[in-house]
Amino acid sequence: MTDEPRPPRPDLTPATRLVALGREPVVPGGQVGAPLVLTSTYHADGPVSYARSGNPTWSAFEEALGSLEGGEALVLASGMAAVAAVFSLLPHGGTVVVPDAAYNGVMATVSALEADTAATVRRVDVTDTGAVVAALEGADLLWLESPTNPLLEVADLEALTAAARERGVLTAVDNTFSTPLLQRPLELGADVVVHSATKYLSGHSDLLLGALVTPATADGRALHERLRRHRQLHGGVAGPMETWLALRGLRTLHLRLERACANAAALAERLADHPAVTRVRYPGIGAIVSVEVLGGPAGAERVCAATEVWVHATSLGGVESLLERRRRHPDEPATVPEDLLRLAVGVEDVEDLWRDLSAALDRAAD
Ligand SMILES: *Cc1c(COP(=O)(O)O)cnc(C)c1O
């Protein structure tokens, strides 16, 4: 077992690396796949003594994801465990800059900090680079998602990370929606990448898992060590079984994402012409499309109730297409329209998806 990632083989494409990495060394008769190691403790005098500090299945997943993001990964129990680890870096009474609409768990986290007067929160329109830069003065942490969930707004990550660095502000980028195949925030200057591996990375809606990735620089390694200590001492660690399943899912990320993105692009175009759709939000990348529909929130709920192929459920990033009205969640920010449906496009046949969705949309104005 080793905690040191193996060389990332940058000569290989991401598609080849996600298939090849995180496997055991070649030993005649040895297993080809990654090990699933179920233990709480290890024989003494090895590199790791207890499973809250390390696990070979974690190392396999971290090797693969770290290589894809171009840094060093840490696996955590869920995306929110990864979010909480990053917020543990915020000094008491510190200032955080966040999008005015982002993942609702992050919005609820910053609201709770604010209510406890533990932090000052500056909410910004991430599409307005000048406004975000102005909000960075005296801040400690810049939290970004791009595209944002669920408004699909796109931030200029490169300009914002550069402005944050000049002012000594740490930048975290939640890359759950894009995955390292579409966007690599460390290359764009981020200090830490956050993932809900529950979504595309694992890809089958059958587990919760999170991850953080930091750059392989001196500053990045120091940050990695603080986050690793947080994981060890906070104790909300990833299950080896979940981690193993996520690595198994990661092997097909390129195939799943390619199909889901192609489906999303085709559906976004057709949705623009559907008479029940008043607005389509699609950033031209990724597999999430948000639409606003006729009939208000009740119209949106009627659409969800009427689909047969699309599954009415929260979450995203699995092989199956999901839809839901986001404002049904109390933590969803009021900046999200009441009639907005988030469509998490899966890998089914696009004609089946369109027939089902377009018939359900016909019910919106009933
Ligand atoms: C789901 C999600 C999270 C939270 O991840 P969990 O694995 O559910 O804890 C964080 N950020 C984004 C963008 C998400 O979609």
Image (spheres, rainbow, N blue to C red):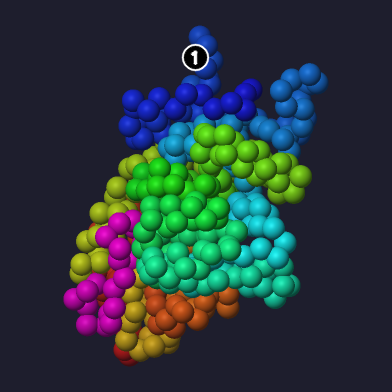
Tell me the residue that label 1 is attached to: 26
Q: Is residue 112 visible?
A: no
**What residue is at 25 percent from the left and 54 percent from the top?**
262
- Say which of 280 and 358 sits in front: 280
Using residue 278 as the reference point, say whether residue 333 is left or right of it: right
Q: Residue at x 58, y 63 (%)?
A: 138
Between 364 and 82, the residue placed more toward the observer is 82
Packing grade of label 1 (10 A; few <14, some 14-19, many >=20) is few
Residue 168 location in percent, x, y?
A: 55, 53
Query: Where, by quadrant of the figure, is residue 277 drawn?
Result: bottom left
Q: Position of residue 203 (x, y in %)?
A: 45, 49
Q: Which residues are magenta?
A: 271-289
Residue positioned 56% across, 46% down in the render: 211
150 sits to left or right of 168: left
Q: Amino acid at mark 1?
A: Val
For label 1, being within 8 Å of ligand 1 is answered no
User: Percent x, y for residue 18?
Assistant: 41, 34
Q: Secondary structure at mark 1?
A: loop
In what quadrant of the picture does the N terminus appear?
top right
Residue 83 in sight from this viewpoint: yes
Which image quarter is the C terminus in? bottom left
315 is within the stretch colored magenta: no
Inspect the magenta stretch and tell me whether residue 278 lies in it: yes
Q: Position of residue 243 (x, y in %)?
A: 58, 40
Q: Residue at x 57, y 58 (%)?
A: 141
Above-or-below relation of 135 to 65: below
Residue closest to the far right? 44
The picture quadrant where one finds residue 5 is top right
Label count reads: 1
> Could you say which is closer to the camera, residue 248 or residue 10?
10
Instruction: Determine which quarter of the picture holds residue 127.
Output: bottom left
